[in-house]
Amino acid sequence: MTTTAHATPVRRATVAPLTTADAERLVAAATAAAEAAGATVSVTVLDAGGHLLAFRRDDHAVLISGETSTRKAYTALQLDAPTADLVEAVRPGGPFHTLPTALDRPLLFIAGGLPVHRDGRLVGAIGVGGGSPEQDHAFAVTAMDSLDSLDALDDRDAGDSPDAP
């Protein structure tokens, strides 16, 4: 007689994906921060699979900013790190020196890309291009802060609901 051990499935809490509404909030917040600073930018938001959720290019933003915002978002997503933190890694002698040319889809190691996390899991990324690298990074951070604030309110409201345990 043979006995078979059955593995107990590991249950992981479901994490809400980045939605189109979330992406639109990120774009609006980054754009508002750029407008307040007098900058014209492009903003790209990708989901966890690298698919476009939202994009906006200001009327007077330089044309290449659309491409740079998308590449920054993709780089932040693929490496799960802010692009501002990766700049030194691609300099000659750095650990990622050849990485920008090693992939089919080009990465861009200029500040302005941030990964988006929910409950510790990667759910997407935002990229901002058109200002200086420091401005683009700051606009992306402002957008993330606005999304984090809304997520915190949603969590609080969910705890106040009559269905909450």
Image (cartoon, grey):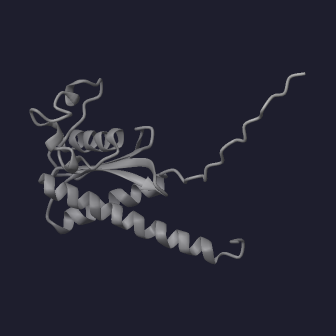
Quarter of the image with the C terminus is bottom right
Quadrant for residue 95, please give it.
top left
Q: Residue furthest front?
A: 1
How many numbered discs sit on the rendered protein?
0
Task: Please give left or right for residue 29 compared with residue 95 in the image.
Answer: right
Q: Please give the name of the residue rendered at 51% of the width and 50% of the height, measured from the top-left corner.
A: 17
Is 61 or 98 nearer to us in this picture?
98
Q: Determine which quarter of the picture holds residue 107.
A: top left
Residue 42, given in percent of the width and then of the height, sits at 24, 49
Q: Residue furthest left?
A: 92
Is residue 71 toward the left or the right of residue 118 in the image?
Answer: left
Q: Is residue 63 visible?
A: no
Q: Position of residue 14 (x, y in %)?
A: 60, 52
- Residue 1 percent location from the top left of the image: 90, 21
Side of 127 relative to 39 (left or right): right
Q: Is residue 30 above or below residue 103?
A: below
Residue at 36% across / 58% down in the picture?
26
Q: Position of residue 18 (x, y in %)?
A: 47, 51
Closer to the camera in the image, 146 or 10: 10
Left or right: 133, with 8 as reference point = left
At a point 70% along the width and 41% down the height, the residue shown is 9
The quadrant holding residue 158 is: bottom right
- Most extreme residue toward the right is 1
Residue that appears at 53% across and 69% down: 154
Q: Is residue 116 visible?
A: yes
Residue 130 sits above or below residue 32 on the image: above
